[in-house]
Amino acid sequence: MNPEDLQSLPPREGRRAGAILGLAVGDALGATHEFCSPEEVPEGPLGMVGGGWLDLEPGEATDDTALTMAVLAGYEGGSLDLRRVRDEMLSWQDTDPKDIGNQTRKALDYLRVHPEALSLPEDPDAQGNGAVMRAASHGAKAGSAEEAVENAWIEAALTHPSWEARASGALVAALVANLIDGVRPEGALNASYALVEGRDEPGKHVRETLRPLDGYEHDPGGWTVYTTRLALLGLLDAPDFRPGLERVIRLGGDADTNGAVAGAVLGARFGVGSIPSEWLHDVRGREDLLHLL
Ligand SMILES: [Mg+2]
């Protein structure tokens, strides 16, 4: 489906496509600026120019999009098949990807030698971005926001078995599901907190831990709590897809994952028709993502 045909999708389908293509677009745009300071990101509109520390081709996406495809493939039979997700992730690791997070590599090495395991042993330090970067897929594929929360919570522990990573993934999944259903952002966020807060633990409250950032603060780099809070601020604050996403990516830091998560929620809010057509045209993997959707 070319970018022009995407404009004519019915509204709900347009928001589903917007969530997943918004994720890939945010990944590919942000990867150019990963590990930059805000001052190092050039002024003017952001383009699909590739480069960055991974020396990417223009429009090339990274692990955020690849892992999202692994989760989407896990829904091919209709409901979530964790074994399929695990196998897809292991196959991706076999391709020697340009970028793979430390925790994700460690987890996949573990799953490879423990074929019966579908989660890692609980690890409170596993708070990297590896789970939240792929969580929007549950919001786009599960049958309801409730199911999206349940699936994201379980699936996050394939690689990131901490409360913070699971709660981040579950919240983003619920938010994407609610936005696709056409709920306005504030209402969608409130409904999503309500679905996740039953999983609060002593001293860990989703409404508090994952509240929107107060402002566009510098990125400490690759922390699931920061990336989620930044995406929530970007969502609530954005007049449209492009300015919302550009503001997030301009902070640098883990710009590809920040861009992926923000791109997913912005795409779910504004729909695929709001994504600039030159970005949709240039992003790699568009047809594969739509096929899995
Ligand atoms: Mg990445």
Image (cartoon, rainbow, N blue to C red):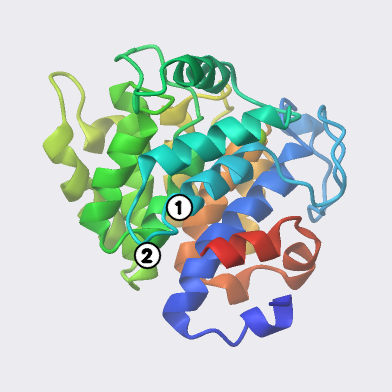
* The one of 152 and 30 positioned closer to us in this rendering: 152
Location of ligand 1 given as a quarter of the image: top right
Q: Residue at x 41, y 24 (%)?
A: 160
- Residue shown at 12% from the left, 38% from the top: 198
**Is 35 located above or below residue 13 in the figure?**
above
Please state, as top left, top right, bottom left or bottom right, where the N terminus lies in the image.
bottom right
Q: Which mark is residue 208?
A: none
From the top left corner, tell me how far across and down residue 179 is, in percent.
Answer: 37, 65
Please, is residue 130 above or below residue 138 in the view?
A: above
Mark identifier at residue 137: 1
User: How would you rate the neighbour count of disc 1 (Cα within 10 Å): few for under 14, some for 14-19, many for 20 or more?
Assistant: many
Q: CA distance from mark 2 to mark 1?
A: 13 Å
* Residue type (three-letter) at the residue carrying disc 2: Leu
Total label count?
2
In the image, which is nearer the foreground, mark 2 or mark 1?
A: 1
User: Which is more N-terminal, label 1 or label 2?
Assistant: 1
Front residue (pair 147, 77):
77
Q: On screen, 119 above or below 14? A: above
* Quarter residue 241 falls in: bottom right
Residue bearing mark 2: 179
Q: Position of residue 171 (x, y in %)?
A: 32, 44
Secondary structure at numbered mark 2: helix
Amino acid type of disc 1? Ser
Residue 256 picture quarter: top right
| Circle 1: element type | helix
Position of residue 85 in the picture relative to residue 285 (left or right): left
Compared across the picture, whether 237 is left or right of 90 comes to left
